């Protein structure tokens, strides 16, 4: 083999090896975001896309300059703590805790890794942050304050069915903080408008079918669907069941109507996920979560 040919081969191999090493180094240095959610990916496609859009607006594109480790609890709250601990063990750069149960699990798992939550409840009331304007610590995020809207949803239902004297509320007892808050809000609203309220429970989607015949037995004219992430992710199934059983139902997601429900009334969950993505990107760039004010949903949508 000639000296020139040997030199060319060495040069070619050297360039290829350098390229592989550079690619490997880039992969190893790419920041990793842990995406933690109580429910399942099927019902959260639009929300996940909005989160990725927010990341992109901050300069981060999945697979190009940021990696994402997804953890879905599939409506099994008992899995969240182990999932959060696993993300901490993997030393992710940020945990995006998208749902109230996920936010609580993430807070319990780490006090050092930044956490960005997207949730329906008051983070101050839950002890996640000290205040909304300057949360302090390693946590910030976006709240829809959806539980506060539970009473509004019942009032909307009453306006549509002014002669109704019995209504129902659907909650998930496996997430007691959300269930208790929703129940308290709905009972207060029911008392104000002179309506008897029945509280129905469902912790898994296979329990949904039995709910609607039960409404008929109770004589409930309408159903307020609580803010639990299980119900958020299964709005299509709940909407179809409500239409099939001719039950007037109100959900926090406006696209619930497209699935057959009567009314969708909420503070814009898609926008909340986008904002959570923006905050995640800002933290990846060096912003401190404790100095980023918690954002609140101010745009209420009804369809």
Image (cartoon, helix red, strand yellow):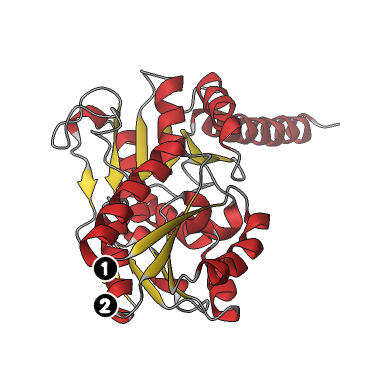
Residue located beneath label 1 in the image:
155
**Residue 302: which quarter of the image?**
bottom left
Residue 269 image offset from top left, x and y in percent: 36, 59
Residue 246 point in image, percent of width and height: 53, 81
Q: Which quadrant would residue 237 be assigned to in this image?
A: bottom right
Q: Are marks 1 and 2 in contact (CB under 8 Å)?
A: yes
Q: Say few, some or many: other residues with alpha carbon within 10 Å of mark 1 (under 14 / 14 to 19 / 20 or more).
A: some
Q: Is residue 289 visible?
A: yes
Quadrant, the C terminus: bottom left
182 left or right of 176 in image: left
Q: Is residue 168 above or below residue 227?
A: below
- Left/right placement of residue 252 relative to residue 62 reads left
Q: CA distance from mark 1 to mark 2?
A: 6 Å
The residue that disc 2 covers is 159
Can see residue 146? no
**Image quadrant for the N terminus?**
top right
The residue sitting at 28% across, 36% down in the picture is: 123
Quick one: 149 or 290, which is closer to the camera? 149
Q: Residue at x 26, y 41 (%)?
A: 122
Q: Residues within 10 Å of mark 2 (few under 14, many from 20)?
A: few
Task: Give the side of residue 135 with respect to residue 201, left or right.
Answer: left
The kind of secondary structure element at disc 2 is: helix
Q: Residue furthest left?
A: 133
């Amino acid at each position: 083999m000639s000296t020139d040919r040997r030199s060319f081969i060495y040069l070619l191999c050297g360039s290829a090896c350098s390229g592989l090493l550079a690619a490997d180094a880039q992969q190893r240095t790419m920041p990793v975001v842990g995406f933690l959610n109580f429910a399942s990916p099927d019902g959260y496609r639009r929300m996940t896309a909005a989160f990725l859009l927010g990341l992109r607006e901050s300069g981060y594109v999945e697979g190009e300059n940021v990696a994402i480790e997804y953890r879905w609890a599939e409506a099994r709250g008992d899995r969240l703590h182990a999932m959060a601990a696993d993300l901490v063990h993997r030393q992710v750069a940020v945990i995006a805790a998208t749902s109230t149960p996920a936010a609580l699990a993430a807070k319990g798992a780490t006090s050092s890794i930044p956490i960005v939550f997207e949730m329906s409840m008051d983070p101050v009331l839950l002890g996640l942050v000290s205040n909304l304007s300057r949360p302090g610590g390693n946590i910030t995020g976006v709240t829809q304050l959806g539980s506060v809207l539970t009473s509004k949803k019942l009032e909307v239902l009453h306006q549509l069915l002014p002669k109704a004297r019995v209504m129902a509320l659907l909650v998930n007892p496996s997430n007691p903080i959300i269930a208790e808050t929703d129940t308290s809000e709905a009972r207060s609203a029911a008392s104000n408008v002179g309506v008897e309220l029945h509280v129905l429970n469902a912790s898994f989607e296979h329990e949904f079918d039995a709910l609607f015949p039960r409404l008929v037995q109770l004589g409930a004219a309408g159903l307020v669907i609580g803010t639990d992430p299980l119900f958020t992710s299964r709005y299509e199934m709940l909407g179809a069941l409500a239409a099939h059983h001719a039950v007037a139902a109100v959900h926090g997601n406006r696209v619930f109507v497209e699935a057959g429900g009567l009314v969708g009334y909420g503070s814009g969950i898609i926008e909340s996920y986008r904002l959570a993505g923006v905050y995640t990107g800002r933290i990846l760039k060096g912003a401190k979560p404790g100095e980023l004010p918690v954002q609140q949903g101010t745009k209420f949508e009804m369809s």
